Amino acid sequence: MTLALDAITLEVPQVRAAADFYSEVFAPKTAERGGATVLDLGGNGEIVLTEWGSGAPEPAGFGGWTLNFIVEQPAEVKAVLDAAERGGATVLKPATKSMFAGFTAVFRAPDGAIWKVASPKRKDTGPAGEPPIPTETVLLLAVADPKASKAFYEKLGLVVDRDYGDKFVDFALVPGATRLGLMRIADLAKDAGVDAAGEEPGGLVLEHRTATSDEAAEVLAAAAAAGGGAVDAAHFADPDGHLWKITAR
């Protein structure tokens, strides 16, 4: 059993407006599925857009997470940020070179989601992709204790990739999925350029898809045994309150 972040449901004020924004910024493949709009981020996970009230608790203040869109080079970071600004996003951190993270920028989308766009390179090595295609996408969760949260997710089959103790932990990338990472609440808020005051998990649901209903039940049982909170027959919350949905394909 290996937990994978196959899709992220974002609850937004208006699905059509959010879909238009993300189509302009990320140029994803878009489909309608079960009354929701699904965005395929270049084969690096899916974003499912639904309206408030369909499952995820609405965050009060900083929602305790950020989405990361990783591209090849700085020109692509700038292109994504420019498109986001044109679409009405608020720039939280302008595009700039980073000592340890290459070249980065952070914006808040009109629906409230915080996105960090990053390249591991500090200089361009060729023409920018049109549109930029992500090399991977990452969801960073704010947690009280990265070591404890790491242990929880390891019990669900995730394999640690980079481990910086109390500072940062992420897990090995699963092909076709979004990478999962963990940071302390204050550190993640600082990285995003926002105030951590009022942090309360909400605004999104993390989805893992299994091949069978028996496998889904196995994941839910493992989460409960590892210390997760049972929500209902299809959902559990991790120790920091982040909500997961387990579905059979």
Image (cartoon, rainbow, N blue to C red):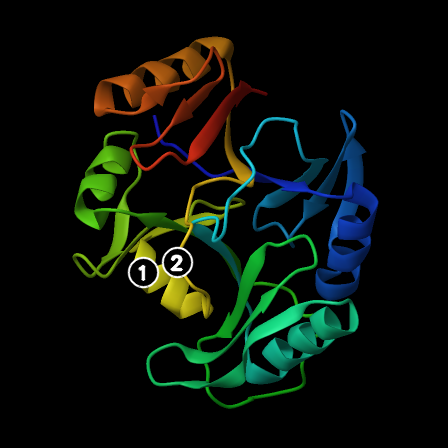
For the question of whether residue 102 can be seen, the reply is: yes
| 208 with respect to 109 (left or right) | left
Give the percent coordinates (x, y) of residue 175. 48, 46
Question: Image height check: is 217 above or below 134?
Answer: above
User: Separation of disc 2 and disc 1 at Cα?
Assistant: 6 Å
Residue at 37% x, 34% y: name it.
Answer: 241
Badge 2 density bin: few <14, some 14–19, many ≥20, Cα 10 Å: some
For the question of whether residue 210 can be seen, the reply is: no
Q: Are marks 2 and 1 in contact (CB under 8 Å)?
A: yes
- Amino acid at circle 1: Ala
| 17 with respect to 145 (left or right) | right
SS for dot 1: helix
Q: Nearer the viewer, residue 93 or 208?
A: 93
Question: Image height check: is 224 above or below 190?
Answer: above
Give the percent coordinates (x, y) of residue 226. 23, 24
- Amino acid at circle 2: Ala
Q: Nearer the viewer, residue 220 or 1?
A: 220
Question: Image height check: is 137 above or below 236?
Answer: below
Badge 1 density bin: few <14, some 14–19, many ≥20, Cα 10 Å: some
Q: Tag 1 or tag 2, which sits nearer the N-term?
A: 1
Give the percent coordinates (x, y) of residue 132. 67, 70
SS for dot 2: loop
Residue at 49% x, 16% y: name it.
Answer: 234
| 39 with respect to 94 (left or right) | right
Give the percent coordinates (x, y) of residue 167. 23, 61
Q: Nearer the viewer, residue 198 or 1?
A: 198
Residue at 32% x, 54% y: name it.
Answer: 185
Quadrant position of the C terminus in the picture: top right
Q: Which residue is mark 1?
A: 186
Q: Which residue is mark 2?
A: 196
